[in-house]
Image (spheres, coloured by chain):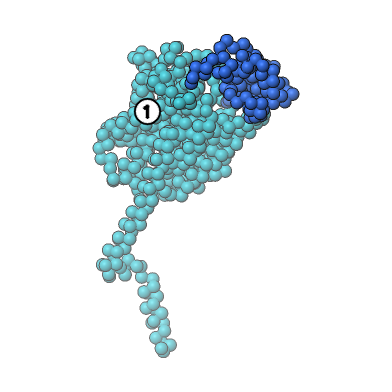
Amino acid sequence: MGSEMKPLLKLCLLTLATTPAALWAQANPDIQARLTAVEAAAKSAQSAGDNAWMLASAALVLLMTGPGLALFYGGLVRRKNVLSTMMHSFVLMVLITVIWAVVGYSLAFGGDGSFIGDLRFALLNNVGAAPNADYAPTIPQQTFMIYQLMFAIITPALISGAFAERMKFSAMLLFMTLWAFIVYFPMAHMVWGKGGLLSASLGGKFPCFDFAGGTVVHITSGVSALVCALYLGKRVGFPSEAMKPHNLVISVIGACLLWVGWFGFNAGSALNASPLASSAFVATHFGAAAAAGGWMLAEWLHNGKPSMLGGISGCVAGLVAITPASGFVRPFPALAIGFAAGIICFLMVAKVKQMFGYDDALDAFGVHGIGGTLGAILTGVFATNSVNDGFKDSAGKLLPLGWVDGHAGQILNQLIGVAISWGLAIVGTIIIIKICDLVIGVRVPKEQEIEGLDVSLHGEEGYILES
Amino acid sequence: MKKIEAIIQPFKLDEVKEALKGIGIDGMTISEVRGHGRQKGHKEVYRGQEYNVDLLPKVKVEMVVANTRADEVIKTLAGAARTGKIGDGKIFVYEVAEAVRIRNDDRGESAL
C-alpha cells in the first residue's frame, strides 16, 4: 500500500473503532433486539440472585424463632416449664402469620403515613411477583412481605423471656395480638415504612439508622419485657429458690442457631445480594464473636470461671447490638460494638438486675433492651458512607452518615429513635397488659405455677425419661 | 436375712460390682441418688445468680443376703468402694422380715 493510503486507512479504522456500538447496532436491528434481551437477562439474573438470597434469608430468620429461640429459652427454664416456653415461640409462628397476612403487612408497609400504614395491602392485595419499588426493587413483593413477616414473628417471641414460667397461655395470645397492632406495626412503619417518622431513606422527619431492627425489634421487645416482668411480678420462690437452667445443652444449640440465622436477619436486610449484604454479614459475625469474648472475659475476671451460659449470652448480646449497625459500619467498629455489648450486658445481667431485684427470667431486657439501645446509639457513631452508599444528596453526592463521617448530629437522631421505641414500648405495653389482666387475667394461679406450666396449661411433659 | 444398703461414689460402682460378683453375689439393685455427709459441695454461677450445690451425685447399691454371708459382703463391698478420702460413703444394714421369689413363690433364704 502506498504511503498516501495509510492516513486514509487509519482514519477509516479510527472512525470504526470509536463509533459507539449502539450506532452500529442501530444499523442492525437484530443486534439491537439482542442487546435489549441481554440487558434484560442481566437484570433478571441480578433479580434472581437477589430473590434467592432473600428467600434463604427469610428461612434463616424463621429458623431463629423455631427452633433457635425455642431451644435457647427452653433450656434456660426449669424442666417443668420447658414446653410452655417453647410454645411461646412456636405459637407466634402461627398467630402472627395470620395477622400479618390479613392486615399486618399493610399496616407496616402500606402507604406513607408518619406513624402507621394503611390498608392497601390488606389480605395481601397486590402483593405478588411485581416488586415494590419503594422497598426492594429487584425482588417480588411477596418475598419482601414474607421476609418481613419473620421479623414480626420473632420480635414478640423475644418478650416471652420476661414472663416465662408464670404467664397464662390465653393471656399471652391476647397480649401478643394487641402488641403487634399497638407497638410492632407502628414501630416498623415509623422506622422502615415510606414516610415513617424515623425513616432514614424514605422521607422521615428524624432519619434514624436502623439497618435490621435494633429499635424496631430489640428495644421494643426488651423494654416491653421489662414492663411485663415488673407487672407480673416475681416467680414463686424467686430469688430464694434455685432456678437453674435445666438443659444448657439445648440452649447452646439454640444460641448457635440464632447466630447463624442472624445472617439472614442482618445481611438479608440489605434486601438484595449486593456487597452491602456481604458487609452486613461480616459485621454481624464479628459483633457476635467479640461480644461472646467480652462477656466470657468479664465473667472470667469477675467470677473466676468463663461459663458456657456466659458465652451464649454474650454472643446474643453482640448480635443484638450489631443489628442496627450491621449495614452501616466497618468490620473493626463491629468488633468494638460487639465487645462493648458483651461487657455492658454482662454487667446489666450480673449486677444491675441483682440491684433492682426484678425477675426478668431470661434477661430479655438486659440483653435485648440494653443491647439494642447501645447498638442504636453506636450506629450513630460508626455509620459510614464507605460501607453504605445509599444516601446521596440531590446532586448525587454521598452524604456523611455517622460521627466517623463527620456527622455527629446523627447520634441525636439515633437518640430520638431510641426514645420513641422506649416510649412506645412502655406506654403500649402498660396499656396492653392491663387490658389483658382485666379481660382474662395474665398470671397463672400459684398451684399451677408450682406444678409447672407444661402439665397445667398444655397437659404434657417435656421429658418422659422412664418410658 | 440382712439388707445391705451402701451409698458409694459413682466412679466406684464397677469395682464394687466386680468384687461382689467375685464372692458369688450377683443380685443387686442400683439407683442414682444425691446427697452428702461431711463432703463439701461446689458453687455454680448462672448469669450472676450464685448457687451452692451441696447435693452431690452418689450411687446406692442394695442387696439382701443370708445372715451368714452379711459380714463377708460388707467387708468386700467396703474394700472395693474405699478411696480413703471424705465422700467414700456409708453402709447400712437392716433386718429383713421376708423374701419371696415371684416366679415360683419360694420363701425365705431359698428365695435369695
Q: Colour of chain A?
A: cyan
Residue at image coords 54%, 33%: A312
Nearer to me, A440 or B46: B46
User: Which sits in the foreground, A54 or B104?
Assistant: B104
Residue A417 makes an appearance in the image: no
* Residue A173 on image: x %, y %: 36, 23
Above or below, A298 relative to A4: above
Callout 1: chain? A
A256 displayed left or right of A307: left
Where the N terminus of chain A falls, by quadrant?
A: bottom left
Q: Colour of chain B?
A: blue
Residue at the location (33% across, 36% down)? A109
Residue B68 falls left or right of residue A209: right
Q: Residue furthest right?
A: B84
Q: Which residue is mark 1?
A: A91
Query: What amino acid is found at the position of numbered circle 1 in the picture?
Result: Val
Residue at 67% across / 21% down in the picture? B73
